Image: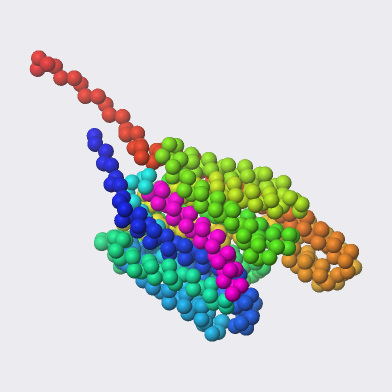
Amino acid sequence: MTVETPTKAGKAAWIGLAVLALPTFVVAVDLFVLLLALPALAADLGANSVQQLWASDIYGFLLAGFLVSMGTLGDRVGRRKLLMIGGALFTVGSLLTAFAPTIELLLLARAALGIAGATLMPSTIALIGGLFQDPKQRATAYGVWGGVYTLGAVAGPVLGGLLLESFWWGSVFLIAIPLLVVMLVLGPKYLPEQSNPAAGKVDYASVGLSLLALLPIIYGIKELARAGWDPVPLLALIVGLTFGGLFVRRQNRLAVPLLDLKLFKNGVISAILANALMFSAVGAGLMLQMLLYFQLVEDFSTLDAALLMVPGMLAGAAGMNLAPRLATRFRPGNVMGGGVILAALVYIVLTQVSVSNGTWLLCVGFVLASFFGTASVALGTGLVIGNAPPEKMGSAGSLVQLGNEFGGTLGLALLGTVAVTVYRGAVDVPTGISADQAAVAGDSLAGAAVTASQLPATPADALLDSANAAFVNGVQVTAIVGAVLYVVGGLLLIVKLRAVPPFGQQAAPPPVEAEPALSEAG
C-alpha cells in the first residue's frame, strides 16, 4: 500500500505566512493597547466610569461573540476574501477610533473593530492550514503564528506606553494601519483563495442565537469578576446559557449548521480545545495577579509592570517555535501534555510566593510556565485544523480562537474571584476607622491602599502589611488551582492524543493477514 506524501510548501507559502502574521499581530496589540490609553482617553473625552468599562471591553466582547459566525462565513464565501474585507474594515475602524471626537463615537468604532477582528483570526488560522499540507511545516507555521500573537500581546502595552509619552491617546490605535495596508496589498498575490463550494446559505437565525448566547455569557463572567456576585451578571449568564441551549438544538437539526457540532466528537479536537480553555484561563489568572502585585504591592508604574511581563512573553514565543521540532521526534500529545504538566510544577513552586520574594519568583515562574506550556498552543492549533475536514477549517479555526478568548475571560473571572475571596477572608482591618473605610479596605488590595492613604502612619502601615499578606495568600491559592487544572489538561492531551504519531511519521497501519503462498507447480 502506498502512502501519499503531503506536498511541501515553497517560498510563496512562507511569504504568505509573513503576510498572515500582520493581522495576527494587530489583533493581539489591540486587545491590550487600550489599557494604558484609558486614563488619558477618559479625561479628554469626559468618559464616566461605565463608559470607560465599555471602552475597555466592547472590542473583546464582540470579537469573541462573532468568532463562530465569521469562521463559518469564511468557509462559505472564501477565507481570503473575508480576510481582505475584515482588514479593510479594521483599518477604517482604527482611524475612526484614533480620531473619535466623543466617547459615544469611540465606542461605536471599537465595536466595529471587534467585529472586524473576528473576521481576521479564523481566516488567518484556516489559511495557514491550507498553505501548509506537510505536518512538520504546518506545525512550524503555527508555532510562528502563535509566537507572533504572543509578541503582539507584549508589544501592545510597551508600544502604547512609548507612544503616550509623546503623542495623544489616539496614536495607539494607528499602529494597526500600516501593517494592514501591507496585508491588503500583498494578500491577493500570496494567499490563495480557499472556500467550500458546496456550502449552503448562512443561517442567520443561528448567527443571532450564537450572539445571544456568547455575549451575555462573556459579559456576565467579566462583571462577576469585576464586581462580585450581583443579580444583573447572574441574569446575563442564565440568558446566555438558555440561548446557548437553543443554539445547540438548532445546529443538531440543520442539514448545514452554522457550527458543525460533530467536530467535538473527534477526540483529538475536543481534548485540544478543552486544554486551550484551561491553559488560557490559568494563564490569564496568573497575569492578572502578577500585574496587581507589581502595581499595588511593589508600587511599580503601569509601564514598568508591563515590561516585567516581557521576559515571560518572549519565553512563550520561544516555546512555541521549539515545540514543532520536538514533535518530529516525540509524539505531539506527549510534547504538549508534558509541557503543560511541567508548567503545573512551576505553579506548585509559585505557592511559595511572599511579599518579600514576589517580584523575582513571579517573573521567573512566568518565564518557565510560558516556555513549557505554550507547546500546547503551538501544536494544538495545527492539529485541530489537520483533524477538521478541509471545508470546515475556518469553523475549526474559530473554535481554537474562541477557546483562547473564552478561556482568558473565564480565568479572569473564576481565578480572580478565588483570589479576592481569599483576600477578604485573610485581611485584618484595623479598629478605629469608619465602617465605610473598613468596607473599602476589606474588599480589595486597591481599596486598602486608598484607605491607608487616609489614615495616620501607624494604622496605615499595619493595614498595608495585612492587605499585602492577604493578597499574596490569594496568589498562592490561585497557583494551587492553576496547578491542578494544568495537570488535568496535560493528562487529557497525553491520553487522547496517544495515537497521533510524531510529525513526518505515518500512523501504524492495521495489520494485514498474509496471503497463502501459491504452489509453483500450479
Whole-percent x, y for residue 128 in the image? 37, 55
Answer yes or no: is residue 242 visible: no
Q: Which residue is pictured at 54% across the width and 82% down the height?
A: 104
Q: Which residue is pictured at 37% across the width and 47% down the height?
A: 137
Q: Residue 43 is drawn in which quadrant?
A: bottom right
Answer yes or no: is residue 379 visible: yes
Q: Which residue is pictured at 44% across the width and 45% down the height?
A: 324
Identify the image's colour scheme: rainbow, by chain, secondary structure or one colour. Answer: rainbow
Out of 140 and 260, give the one closest to the viewer.
140
**Magenta highlight: main SS:** helix
Looking at this rendering, what residue extends furthest in the left direction? 522
Q: Residue 426 is drawn in which quadrant?
A: bottom right
Whole-percent x, y for residue 403 in the image? 49, 57
Q: Which residue is pictured at 60% across the width and 49% down the height?
A: 367
Out of 331 and 255, give the one closest to the viewer.
331
Q: Is residue 36 found left or right of 469 in the rendered image?
A: left
Looking at this rendering, what residue extends furthest in the bottom direction? 101
Q: Which quadrant would the N terminus be assigned to in this image?
A: top left
Q: Which residues are magenta?
A: 138-166
Image height of 414 relative to 521, above or below: below
Q: Is residue 143 magenta?
A: yes
Q: Is residue 273 magenta?
A: no
Out of 368 and 252, give the one closest to the viewer.
368
Q: Is residue 117 found left or right of 478 in the rendered image?
A: left
Whole-percent x, y for residue 30 in the image? 51, 68
Q: Is residue 487 found left or right of 420 in the rendered image?
A: left
Whole-percent x, y for residue 186 in the image? 33, 65
